[in-house]
Amino acid sequence: MRQLPLARRGERLSVLCLGAHSDDIEIGAGGTILRLIADGVLLDVHWCVLSAAGVRAQEAKNSALAFLDGAASHRVELAEFEDSYFPSQSREIKQWLNAVRERFTPDVIFTHARDDAHQDHREVNHLTTNVFRNHLVLEYEIPKWDGDLMQHNTYMPLTAKVMDRKTDLLLEHFGTQRSKDWFDELTFKGLARLRGMECRAEDRFAEAFTNRKLALTIG
């Protein structure tokens, strides 16, 4: 398996994180963000949650700030699009993302997977790839009852310390989700262990992503 550095220690990396709901970014790419910060990459992060209101908004903000502790700079932006009805709000969400594009030029974007079973997640993916056409886009996964996990082609190995930190922060900040039978340490670490096996991660854990398009260069 070919290994390519996303960024090196001391280098700046601008990252746009897009999540439909309050805990999506943390579940799908939170370990990667934590590892980049722990490894000394200077992250400039624009963290956007498209459906966050009431208690969920406060959870989203507090969690984002915890995951981004140590980043070089960060901005957390919350919207209040109606949960479960993103396809019918496509025009408004696209306008919102266009405005984000005007304010921030990322090196890499983390967003939902194209074939995710949740309609909100799919809509965010479709609009991300439409609005941000010339960017490196990495699609993350969210485990759920629908059983829509898929084969991926890109991995970020995680240390056991980073994996523990990711799990602890998820359980700490999302009290509204702890009643769900899948929202627990076994789910998060079990999936990360499987992805770690797939990429032969030294510390056994990894997050997995799909990249749809790369242009190769020489020199």
Image: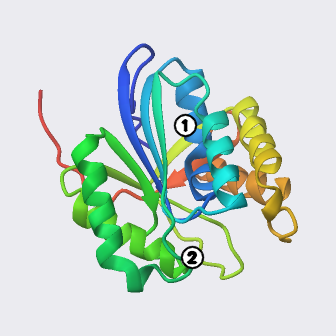
**Residue 133, quarter of picture:** bottom left
| Closer to viewer: mark 1 or mark 2 | 2
What residue sits right under mark 2 in the picture?
A: 83
Q: Is residue 25 at least partly visible in the picture?
A: yes
Q: Secondary structure at mark 2?
A: loop
Q: Is residue 200 at least partly visible in the picture?
A: no
Observer-nearest of 208 and 74 = 74
What residue sits right under mark 1 in the picture?
A: 33
- Horizontally, residue 104 falls left or right of residue 196, namely left
Q: Residue 83: x and y, percent?
A: 57, 76
**Residue 124, quarter of picture:** bottom left
- Horizontally, residue 197 falls left or right of residue 116, namely right
Observer-nearest of 122 and 209 = 122
Residue drawn 56% across the image and 62% down it: 141
Q: Residue 143: x and y, percent?
A: 66, 67
Q: CB of mark 1 within 8 Å of CB of mark 2?
A: no
Outermost residue to the left: 218
Q: Residue 158: x and y, percent?
A: 63, 37
Q: Residue 37: x and y, percent?
A: 55, 25
**Residue 153, quarter of picture:** bottom left
Residue drawn 77% across the image and 54% down it: 174
Q: Secondary structure at mark 1?
A: helix
